[in-house]
Image (cartoon, rainbow, N blue to C red):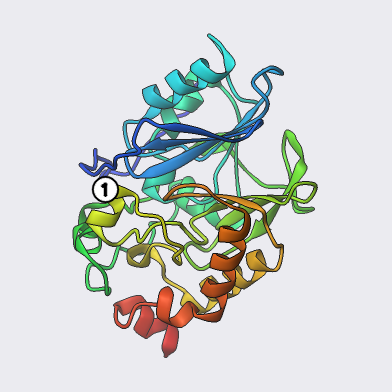
Amino acid sequence: MDENLTYGEDYKYIPATSIESGVGTEVLPDLYSYTIQIVNIVLVGHPDKKEFVLVDAGMPYSAEKIMTETERRFGEGSRPKAIILTHGHFDHVGGIIELIKKWEVPVYAHEFELPFLTGEMDYPEPDPSVEGGMVSKMSPMFPNEAIDLGSHVKPLPEDGSVPHLPDFRWIHTPGHAPGHVSLFREKDKALIAGDAFVTVKQEYLYKVITQEQEISGPPRYLTTDWTAARESVEKLEALKPTVAITGHGLPMTGELLTDSLHKLVQEFDSIAVPDFGKYVDETSE
């Protein structure tokens, strides 16, 4: 590996955690969610078959935790066939470079995310002025500079297929990020939503720490297009998922998921969209 893979100069450990940190949940026999501080990664694949894919790459400095949990589930020396990124925000790519170097596997993301993953473009700065609690106020410390994965990151196939996951398809769900994607499996209506919607009020420190479960829109302090965010939630609700793993919060299933998603669609402006914030104002202009 001769490329100089780099994080942004603002890459750093973020001192935020929750009671679920370090906890893994087998949502389905081949869907495993693991919480690192305040964000979830997903291991997709049956542990008996030893072939799997990693979705997202956790908080900064989380690579060792991801590798340890991967080996605990799939066996010593195991490595995924690929890493799929729902998007490139700091809490979803925090361990990606170390994982690439250790595992030597390809990374896939939507083509609209590639500028943020190849050193070409920084994300907009987090908005501490947005309506919300302490996490929103802390957001200026969150990294937003582009990382550079060089040729190791590739665009997802245009036909909607997901490499090494033939039963899943990716769905473009922008709003929180331009190239945000969610993954959906029709046969059992399993959804990996990323941050298109979450199951915790991510802006409020107490709720993040306690992981109090309630459906919410994408994290407000990093969401720049609320019109697109609403359309993405509508698109996912129309799929009628029976189980959802989100980027933040506990997995949600069954009637609770159905009813909560329906409510989020019907009341998106009051539940998800903040009353104020610079990206709210820009979206409404």
In the picture, measured across the screen, residue 241 lies left or right of residue 59, that is: right
Secondary element type, mark 1:
helix
Q: How many marks?
A: 1
Quarter that holds the C terminus = bottom left
Q: Residue 269, image x and y in percent?
A: 45, 82
Residue 156's place in the image compared with 264, above or below, is: above
The residue under the point 66% across, 30% down is 29
User: Which is more toward the observer, 17 or 95?
Assistant: 17
Q: Can residue 94 be spotted in the picture?
A: yes
The residue under the point 60% across, 55% down is 181
Residue 246's place in the image compared with 37, above or below, is: below
Q: Residue 103, image x and y in percent?
A: 54, 20
- Residue occupied by mark 1: 209
Dot 1 surroundings within 10 Å: few (below 14), some, or many (20 or more)? Answer: some
The residue under the point 52% across, 79% down is 227
Q: Residue furthest top?
A: 76
Q: Residue 178, image x and y in percent?
A: 52, 63
User: Which is more toward the observer, 86 or 102?
Assistant: 86
In the picture, measured across the screen, residue 70 lies left or right of residue 123, that is: right
- Name the residue type under label 1: Ile
The residue under the point 39% across, 59% down is 123
Q: Residue furthest bottom?
A: 285
Quadrant for residue 152, please give it. top right
Q: Can residue 148 be spotted in the picture?
A: no
Q: Residue 138, image x and y in percent?
A: 19, 57
Residue 163's place in the image compared with 122, above or below, is: above
